[in-house]
Structure formats: C-alpha cells, structure tokens
Amino acid sequence: MAVRVDLMVSLDGFATTTDRTPESPFGEDWSRLVGAYVGTRTFRERVLGDASGQGTTGVDDRYAQEYFQGVGAEIMGAGMFGLHDHPGEPDWCGWWGDEPPFRCPVFVLTHEPRAPLTMDGGTTFTFISTTPQEALALATESAKGKDVRVGGGPTVVREYLKAGLVDRLHVAITPILLGRGVRLWDDLRGLEVGYTVRSETAESGTIHLTLQR
C-alpha cells in the first residue's frame, strides 16, 4: 500500500484559481489549468461517461489512467468536495453528479457535521473532523491493501507532505502562469530529499513530475 498524490499546478506553482464567478463557477483559468487532463480519453470515459473513444491517448492519458489504478480509498478537503461554496446545505452531494469517478470510500476533512453519502458506482463520502494521521489510518483500513490517494486541495496535500506521509507525489505542471491562488510548494523546502525524482514532458507541453519514495 502506498499513499499517493496527483495534482495539477501552474508554472508558478498554483493549484487553485481565483477567477470564479456565480455565472462561471470554475472560471476560465481552471479550464486552462486542467485542459490537457480533461482532454484525455481516460477522463472522458471515467468522469464524463463518454464511450465514444474520443480524447487524447498520449503521455497525458497514460498518467490519467494511472490516476485511477489501484486506489482503495481517497482523502480530500472540504473545498474539493464543494463545502466552501455550499456551507450548511445538507442536500449538496459534491461536484461529480450521482456517480462520482472515485468508486471507493472517500473521507472528507471538514468541521461541518454531515451524514455519510452513498453514491452510485461504489463511492461513499464520509465526513470527518480529525488529524491527517487519523484520517489516513481510517482510509488505510478501508482501502484493504490498495493505495490511498490524497486528492486535494493543495492545502490538504501540503499537510500530508509536511508530515512525511506521502510515498508518491505526481505533479502535472501546466505551462501557464496564474499569478495568484493557493501554491503547492510553500514551506516545503528540501521536499525532494528522500525521493527519486523523474520528469516527462507530454505532447501538450505539460511536465509530469514524479517524486517516488
């Protein structure tokens, strides 16, 4: 079992965007940041339910396939689930529709008490207020020998990295500048020590950086 992270950041290290509006809840910058991933055949099949075979099949798609392989449980922050945008809304079920792409137990770190949500396709959201270490213990037990992924956002990922709990960090660096948002790399000086580092550039220009313990 390994603890994994897969995240997309800009050239200047930002993993979130700041141009959202009520009319455009994701904003134009989000499309720029994740465009190469969203354009892959794997994303279209797994997330959008598109069985047409359309989408890119190069290096970006290979990493998209790896994203979904071997994961037995996921940990995410309240923002990734959408609670920051929908506080106190008990009927809010997240961003991913009736059949989220995770297909495993998902533990959401939040101070907002909520009942567990069981979705189609095998995803169950459990809302917990606890430490990163205790959340990881719960996720590891639920994963039953498979990997645990810390899905995000960047603030949650940084907590796990600072605690030395991540075995494999994959960062897809999109060749754009955002200039503002939440940066992944803050307060992580020397993170690369203890990891084997490799990089690969995709046809889209995205740089796939992997740190493996």
Image (tube, rainbow, N blue to C red):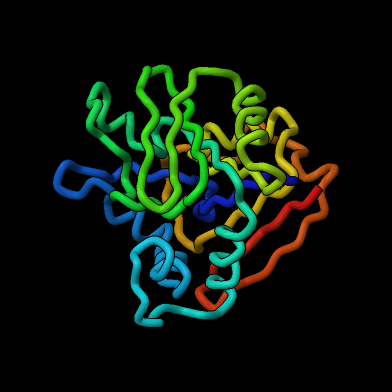
Q: Which residue is drawn at 68% across and 48% down?
A: 146
**Total residue callouts:** 0
> Is residue 28 rendered to the left or right of residue 174?
left
Residue sitting nearer the eye, 46 or 32: 46
- Against 65, residue 10 (above or below) is above
Location of residue 78 by image quarter: top left
Residue found at the very far right of the displayed protein: 194
Q: Which residue is drawn at 25% across and 30% down?
A: 86
Location of residue 114 by image quarter: top left
Across and down, in percent, residue 35 comes to 40, 65
> Is residue 194 rendered to the left or right of residue 123?
right
Across and down, in percent, residue 159 comes to 61, 29
Residue found at the very far left of the displayed protein: 23
Across and down, in percent, residue 95 comes to 31, 45
Residue sitting nearer the eye, 119 or 196: 119
Location of residue 16 by image quarter: top left
- Against 52, residue 174 (above or below) is above
- Against 49, residue 101 (above or below) is above
Across and down, in percent, residue 53 comes to 40, 82
Q: Which residue is drawn at 48% across and 51% down?
A: 103
Q: Residue at x 34, y 54 (%)?
A: 29
Residue sitting nearer the eye, 189 or 30: 30
> Is residue 154 rendered to the left or right of residue 146?
left
> Is residue 2 rendered to the left or right of residue 45?
right
